[in-house]
Amino acid sequence: MKQTLFLLVFILGCEGVEEKRSGESRDGRPDAESWDATITLTNEGAKRAVIRAGHLENYDERQYILLDQNVDADFFNAEEVYTTNLKSKIAEIEEDRDYMIAIGDVVVVSDSGVTLFTDTLSWDNVKEKVFTDDRVVFITEDQDTLYGIGFESDVELNNWKILKPTGVFHEDEDER
C-alpha cells in the first residue's frame, strides 16, 4: 500500500513541474524595460544626446530601443555643449547604426532660437544630421515662418534646408 501511494505522489509531482515549464514564450518581448528612463548616446566618447522617456523597451538581439512615452531629448555638440531639444510622442533607436527616429508631434528647439515642427524626424549620430521627408514648419530666429516638405540640417539647426518649400513669402518694403 505504501508503494502505491508513493508512486501516485511522484506521478502527480511530475505533472505539476511540466505545466510550469510550458508557460508563455519570450518571443517578441523586450529583454529589458524601464520606466522614467534616461539614456545617454555618445559619438567617439563625447556625449551627443541625453534622452528621457516615460517608458523604454530594449531588444538586445535586434539592437533596438523603443521609447514610447513623452520623449524629451537634449542634444550636444562635439564639445558636449547643449545645443538643441527635441520632444516627440515616441522614438526608435537603432543601436548598431547610431540612428534615432522621433515620431509623433515632433518639436525641435535650438539654443539659437529656431523651431522645427514635423511628424517624424530622423537623427543620424554618425553623420551628425537630422532630416525628414514629411511636412515641416520652420520658425527662424527672426520669427519668419517657413513651410515645406522635406528637411535636412545639422543637429544645431544652423545649416538647414527645406527640400520643397511651399506657401507664399511676403517681403517688407524695408527689405527690398
Image: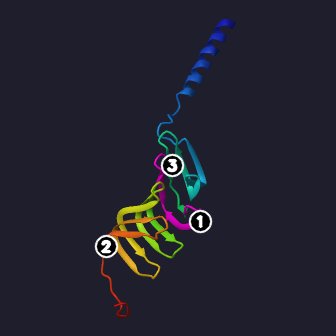
Whether label 2 touches label 1, CB < 8 Å? no
Q: Is residue 55 above or below residue 32?
A: below
Residue 125 spot, x, y in % from top left: 48, 56
At x 34%, y 88%, the residue is 171
The residue identified by callout 1 is 81
Answer with left or right where residue 9 lies relative to residue 147: right
Residue 124 spot, x, y in % from top left: 45, 56
The residue identified by callout 2 is 165
Q: Secondary structure at mark 2?
A: strand
Whether label 2 touches label 3, CB < 8 Å? no
The residue identified by callout 3 is 65
The count of marks equals: 3
At x 30%, y 74%, the residue is 166
At x 43%, y 62%, the residue is 130
Kind of residue indicated by mark 2: Pro
**Mark 3 surroundings within 10 Å by alpha-carbon count, few (fewer than 14), some (14 through 19), many (20 or more):** many
Name the front one of labels 2 and 1: 1
Name the front one of labels 2 and 3: 2
Q: Which residue reaches farthest bottom?
A: 173
In the rendered structure, which segment of residues is drawn in magenta? 76-99
Name the front one of labels 3 and 1: 1
Q: What is the distance, in whole Å, between disc 2 and disc 3 at their CAs?
A: 33 Å
Looking at the rendered image, the quarter that the N terminus falls into is top right
Q: Is residue 1 above or below residue 131?
A: above
Q: Nearer the viewer, residue 163 or 30?
A: 163
Q: Which residue reaches farthest right?
A: 2
Q: Is residue 174 magenta?
A: no
Whether label 3 touches label 1, CB < 8 Å? no
N-terminal-most mark, 2 or 3:
3
Q: Nearer the viewer, residue 80 or 98?
A: 80
